[in-house]
Each structure stands twice: as structure tokens, then as C-alpha cells.
Image: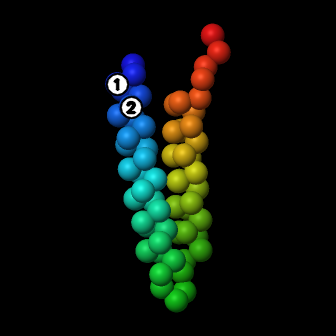
Amino acid sequence: MMRRRLWLSLGLVVVLVLGAALEWWLLRPLEPNPFLVGLVGLLMGGALALLVSLWWPRRH
């Protein structure tokens, strides 16, 4: 279980890094598309929430 959680966490960190690069690329033009910027932001927020939930201590 721990190994799978580590790999999933690594994958989510990669998604966050790629999302940040995509946000930067979408904001570079003179007229950025606010819909795409917001959508990428929501997806990155979901990935961050999953990452936090994986490592939050559980009560049994």
C-alpha cells in the first residue's frame, strides 16, 4: 500500500508541475483564455486535494 501511495503521489506532483507549466503558457499571450486558465486551475486544485488526502492521517 505504501509503495502505491508513493507512486500515486509522485504522479500527482508531476500533474501539478505540468499544470503549472500549462498555466504559465496559457497566461503568456496578450489575451489569455480565461476559461482554459480556470479549468486548468480547477484540475490542479483537484490534484492538490488528492495529494493532501493521500497523506492526511486517518483515524481508525
Q: Residue extending furthest right?
A: 59
Residue 40 or residue 6, whichever sits in front:
6
Number of other residues with Cα within 10 Å of mark 1, as a class: few under 14, some 14 to 19, many 20 or more: few
Q: Label 1 to label 2, Cα distance in Å?
A: 5 Å
Instruction: Indicate the amino acid at tag 1.
Output: Arg
> How far from the left and from the top, in percent, is residue 20?
47, 62
Q: Residue extending furthest top?
A: 60
Q: Quadrant of the C terminus?
A: top right
Determine the residue positioned at 51% across, 46% down: 47
Residue 46 or residue 52, whichever sits in front:
52
Q: Is residue 54 above or below residue 58?
A: below
> How far from the left and from the top, in percent, is residue 22?
43, 67
* Element class at badge 2: helix
Q: Is residue 38 above or below residue 48?
A: below
Instruction: Indicate the amino acid at tag 2.
Output: Leu
Q: Quadrant of residue 39?
A: bottom right
Number of other residues with Cα within 10 Å of mark 2, as a class: few under 14, some 14 to 19, many 20 or more: few
Residue 39 or residue 53, whichever sits in front:
53
User: Marks 1 and 2: CB-CB under 8 Å?
Assistant: yes
Q: Is residue 54 left or right of residue 11?
A: right
User: Which disc is residue 48 wearing?
Assistant: none
Q: Quadrant of the N terminus?
A: top left
Residue highlighted by disc 2: 6
> How far from the left and from the top, in percent, is residue 14?
38, 50
Residue highlighted by disc 1: 3
